[in-house]
Image (spheres, helix red, strand yellow):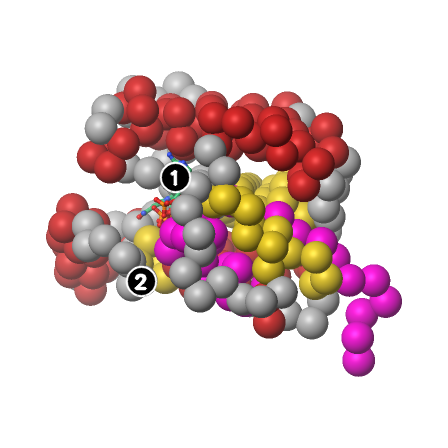
Amino acid sequence: MMPDKLKSALVIGATGLVGRALLMKIAKAPGYGRIVALSRRPIEDCPGNVDNIVLDFDHLADHAAVFNVDCFFSCLGTTRKQAGSIEAQRVVDYDYQRHAAELARAAGVKHLLLVSSSGADAKSASAYMKMKGELELAVHALNFDKLSILQPSLLVGKREHHRLGESLGESALNWLNALGILKRYRPIAGSQVADALLYLVENQTGASEVYRLDEIFTLT
Ligand SMILES: NC(=O)c1ccc[n+]([C@@H]2O[C@H](COP(=O)([O-])OP(=O)(O)OC[C@H]3O[C@@H](n4cnc5c(N)ncnc54)[C@H](OP(=O)(O)O)[C@@H]3O)[C@@H](O)[C@H]2O)c1
C-alpha cells in the first residue's frame, strides 16, 4: 500500500560510503517522492528518480531553494589526509555541514539527520572530535522539529579509494573485539548506518536524539 503522502529528501555526501548507500535505499523506498542529492561531482549510476545537482559547496546558498524538503540527510566528511590540513578538513566537516543545516532550517526542513562520530565532543583536545562536537551543538541550536545525530565509530564497506589507516584500524578493532576489548568502538557497515537513518525517519519519537554506536546497531 502506498503511503498517504510521499516524503521529499535531500542528501549531501551521496558519493560517500554512508551517503551513497542511503541514496540507493531511498531511491527504492516506496515512501519517497522528490529526492535531491547535492554533490561536487556527478554521482555514478545515479538512480533515475534522483535529481543530482552538481555544485561547489562554497556556493551552497545559490541553491537555497532545493533545501525545501521534509528530511535532510547530512553525510558529508573528509579526512585530514584527503583535505590536506586540519583547517581544510574543518571546512568540509564543519562549515559546509553547518551552512547546509542553516539553509535547511530556513527552508522549513522538519527533520535533520546528521552522521557525526563516536567521541564527538566540542571540548575535545582532538581537532577532529572537537569539530564534530561543535557541529552537533550548532545543529542542535537550530531547533529543528526533529533532529537525529548518529555517532558511528569506524565505518566499513567498499570505498572508491582505499584508506590504509582505516583498514588497519578495522583489523585492530576486530582483533580487540574478539578478545572482548573496545567493543564500544567496533566497526559498523556504512549500509547499516544508512538503514538506521531511514528507520529513524519513520520511527523516532523524541524531538532531538543522539544515537551512540550500540544503539545504531539496533535501529532496523
Ligand atoms: N570513515 C569513518 O570511519 C568514520 C567514522 C566515524 C564517523 N565518520 C563520519 O561519518 C560521515 C560519513 O562518512 P563516510 O565515510 O560515509 O564519508 P566518505 O565516504 O568519506 O564521503 C564523504 C562525502 O563528502 C564529500 N566531500 C568531501 N569533501 C568534499 C568537498 N570539499 N566538497 C564537497 N563534498 C565533499 C565526498 O564527496 P567526494 O566523493 O566527491 O569526495 C563524499 O560524498 C562523515 O561525516 C565522517 O566524518 C566517518
- Decide which of 104, 178 is in the foreground and name it: 104
> In the rendered view of the protein, which quadrant contains the N terminus?
bottom right
> Would you say the beta carbon of the disc 1 residue lies within 8 angstroms of ligand 1?
yes
- Decide which of 203, 68 is in the foreground and name it: 68
On the image, the x and y values in percent for residue 24 come to 51, 65
Is 41 placed left or right of 195 in the picture? left
Q: Is residue 146 magenta?
A: no
Characterize the local packing of mark 1: few (<14), some (14-19) or many (20 or more) Cα atoms within 10 angstroms.
Answer: many
Q: Is residue 8 magenta?
A: yes
Q: Is residue 138 visible?
A: yes
> In the rendered view of the protein, which quadrant contains the C terminus?
bottom right
Name the residue at 53% across, 59% down. 23
Q: Which mark is residue 77?
A: 1
On the image, the x and y values in percent for residue 17 come to 38, 55
Q: Is residue 87 above or below residue 70?
A: above
Q: Earlier in the sequence, mark 2 or mark 1?
A: 1
Name the residue at 28% across, 58% down. 159
On the image, the x and y values in percent for residue 14 come to 47, 52
Name the residue at 19% across, 50% down. 163
The magenta-colored residue range is 1-26
- Decide which of 71, 217 is in the foreground and name it: 71
On the image, the x and y values in percent for residue 154 come to 30, 50
> For numbered disc 2, what is the local secondary structure?
loop
Q: Is residue 17 above or below residue 94?
A: below
Q: Is residue 114 above or below residue 154?
A: above
Tag 2: residue type? Answer: Gly
Choose top left, top right, bottom left or bottom right for residue 32.
Answer: bottom right
**According to the image, label 2 marks what residue?**
157
